[in-house]
Image (cartoon, coloured by chain):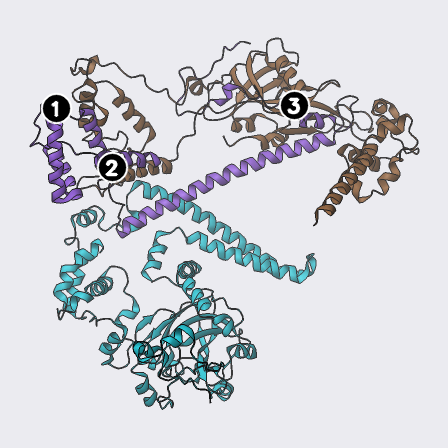
Amino acid sequence: MPAPSRGRSAVSALLKTSTRRAQVCSQCRSNGITNTSSTTARPTPSHRTQPSPLSAARRFYSSEAAAAAATSTQPPPSGQQQPPTETDSPATTTTTTTRYRIKSGIILTRPPLLTRTLTPFESSFFLYQKRLNERLSAPFRSSFYFKTDTAADLDWRIKLKERHGVPAKDIGRYNPRGRMGWNDEVLVGSRTSDPAEVAERLVLDAEMRVSEDGEEIAEDERVPVERPLPRRTEADEKNDVRRLDRALDKTLYLVVRRGEGENATWGFPSGDVPTHENLHETALRVLAESAGVNMNTWFVGRVPVAHHVSDPVVGPDGTETPRSGEKVFFLKGRIMAGQADLKGNRHGLTDFKWLTQDELRAELPADYFRSVRNMFADR
Amino acid sequence: MSRCQQVARPLVRSLRPCPSAAAAASQSSHTTLAVRYLSSTAARRDLDKTTTTQPGSDALDAALLGQSAAAAPQDTPQTRQQLAALGSADLGSRRRRAALATTGDIPFEQLPYQCFQEARKILNQDREEKIAKIVAETEKIKRLEAADASTMRGGEAYKQKRLVSLREHVEELKILADINDPEVKRRFENGTGDMSKPIYRYLANRRWRSMDHKIVVQRIEQFNIVPDLLPRFEPTMDVKMSFRGYTVSPGAVLDSRLTEVAPTLRMQVFDKGERLLTIVVLDSDVPDEATDGYARRCHFLAANVPWDPSKNLLSLRQVGGGGGELAVPWLPAFAQKGAPYHRLSLFVLEQKAGETLDGAKLKALYGGRDGFSLKSFRDKFGLTPVGFNLFRSEWDEGTAAVMEKHGIPGADVEFKRARVVSMKTPRAAKGWEAKRQGPKYKSLWKYTKRIKGARFERN
Amino acid sequence: MSLTLNIRGLATRLFARPRLPTPTTTTTARFTTLTPVMMARFDSSANTFGGKAGLAAKQKRTAKKGSKGEQRDPKMINMLKHFAILSPRRIPPPLRMARNRHLRHWTIHRAWLLFRRREREGRERTLMRQYQGMYAACEALRLSDGPGTRETGYLYRVAMEKKGVYGHHGVPIEYARPQTETPARTPWNHDWKL
């Protein structure tokens, strides 16, 4: 394409978009504008019935929703829609079939603190690879790392002897350069590859065996090395579901109980969104109001990760609604420190729990769980 | 040399019937033969079969191929017994003895190595998943076959398309279910895989595509088989050619005494099912003085050869007997003196399903051999070219004898290049050239005067 | 890899420089750490590099230097010995496996690939599921009337705004804590106060 025509096309494209935008804008604002004064603006229903392909491609969601609503209900004869403020009037409530309260919920999660446990295949594969690596790498030369006849060197020599001359600490008794160097596979039932066993050996190895002046320390005088803590904590053993230091390799979710006795239900903290607030503002406020402020939390974005719709219960005559419908949009939050505290909450909450995904399945109502289960992580 | 070969070497050396000076050259191949024959893996079928026709021709063939004759190990009960001892736990390296002592009679699958057993658990689980999927898909196929096509939106065409894709998926799953099995790998490497099973066909195809297919494709391109013989051609089956028991690589220049008899083909198809094949050998470089160009000639033509993946070997000398119809018998490859090399290409064409070609008609059409066009042959009978191999032929010291033996005329003809005479008139020497025409520069005359075969005068 | 190469390059450069003094010329106490085997190796390497004439010339040179009293630091010798181990000649050859052993290795390798593949696909499925959940929630939000008097889709529009989401303090530093194999001394701080 030659340069002049390219310029022309660019300009025409610009022009096209500007005109299109103008169309759409007028259409978008048609709710407000047509209501107030403008008679020059195109009437909305006719526009809806014959949408030009251009405007159809760029139609805004709000106008589309309006179109959907208008097709389901009878459009006003004047072709002008009622402003949303008037929806509370009895005339409109009879025409619109369902009204929902918008609620904002917060799924507060504690991320896993520990890595997952290794599968037996993984741990045995790692040992297998370590031994192959031993076969392929240069021999270990301790004099490069330990100055001769220092305490560290003596200590190393003692430990090396106890490991039968194997420099590596976690591969068991295997010498790649010996006459049985080819026999590098561990037999079934061996515990050499067990991660707990490996950790035990590393801890033993970390103990200093020689004093500063080169004397070997007797066994009862050695300074014990601090052992790594167990992966299952005290709260795990007691199954204390209120504490956050349980199930450390899984995600925990905060659920609260609303009401007392028979009609008590478990669910995530949630509250109504007032007109002047947004989802995330409400979620922040609701969390502070229901579970206290002593939690270091962070909201992962403002986009809802799940939603739950409960349809209104319609009375026998069709007009009365014992329970109105509600839509709860859940935002995802993370807790980094602190603990929930229900004292003085304004939402009628009586209890809280930190549960894993599997425990949630048992605790939450089935349809509620089905609505939110898509947001769960693997563990 | 591998470890087991090292172990077997002394024994094999003592078994060798005639240790001669030439044995040193043949030692490596010899050892390999013996070891392969004896190893726990199944022996290849062809090793104890000789493919030569005349008993005395071994030395000749070997000389033709530039190899020293390697005598096969003698197969007597005694040697068998001795070599069977190789499998015992008392022989071999320290490592082998130790390994046999710890894991002697345990089958490979149950060797008690931790990581190996954990790995097998993972693989077995995957295999079970795949098999469950195969069962489910087969059920789906059955349901679809039973369903009425008129109820579907796409009609019969949609149903057939869906069936085809489902069956393909099942085939794929069958391969995936077996591809991680070490025993399958071992059997395939031993050459004992059952080619009627999809996994072995898949593995064979993969191996062929890794090298041999590439070579064949390269030959097709560099010898201009496309577009000289066919406008386009993609080989999909493996065809290997061997003359007098010697496998030749595609495109090799072969001695005319070697190509005197028809080759034996080692053909492998990679898709399931029975089909009929047509085999054509044609020479595409027959010099034609009349047109000052090249013509084609059919050297061999056989049709209706039944073939399936489990078959492997086909001797072109016995095509008439065991299935298939010989239309044009083998004509030895030859090239007259002075002619450039002849490309003799072997094509394997697949016939339409359920159709046989009329042998008498083929004889009548192509019995004259000359002017054979592969493309028109393909179009006339609706064939699909699937396999290809190639060798070349040149004039050599044996060609005359071969031609005489088979009654082919033209052994006394020698082709020469016609000299292109200059159209310019001869002109007198001038300048530098003229000064050096005298007897003083006699040493330069050989470049300008009385050049053999050249006639400078125009007639 | 590149680190190893560099070290090897350093080793060759060190070797290319004048050899260690031979035991015939200097017999000072500083070289007692050098075992006879090591010395023999250095000598033989000199032999292979320079040939006979080269060796003679080298000896002459080292003799001169020895008379000057230049001696190599023991640390340097230690280093050189270490690099000698890393030389390609001393690195073990590639693994050679017999048939059954190779088949076992192949089985393990295939299982590992399969395992990795399953994990990867599981991760992808989870992400897909989470995305679908978010998509459904957003779609419902887009089509619902706003709270109170707000028009349809107002909340959706606000939720899509990215103002203040990224940037400094967008993600708290505590969130950078990696997962560990065993818990900390106090696994969780329950007494955190605002």
Task: Work out whether residue A262 or residue A182 is closer to the camera in this orientation and state it.
Answer: A182
In front: mark 3 or mark 2? 2
Residue A206 visible, this angle: yes
Image hue for chain A = brown
CA–CA distance in space, label 1 to label 3: 70 Å
The residue sitting at 35% across, 55% down in the picture is B185
Quadrant of res B281: bottom left
In front: mark 1 or mark 3? 1
Q: Position of residue C49 (x, y in %)?
A: 18, 42
- Residue type pointed to by label 2: Thr
In the image, residue C125 above or below residue B64? above
The residue sitting at 39% across, 42% down in the picture is C112
CA–CA distance in space, label 2 to label 1: 23 Å
- Residue type pointed to by label 3: Lys
Image hue for chain C = purple
Question: What residue is shown with label 3?
Answer: C163
In the image, residue C129 above or below residue B162? above
Image hue for chain B = cyan
Which label belongs to residue C12?
A: 2
Q: Secondary structure at mark 2?
A: helix
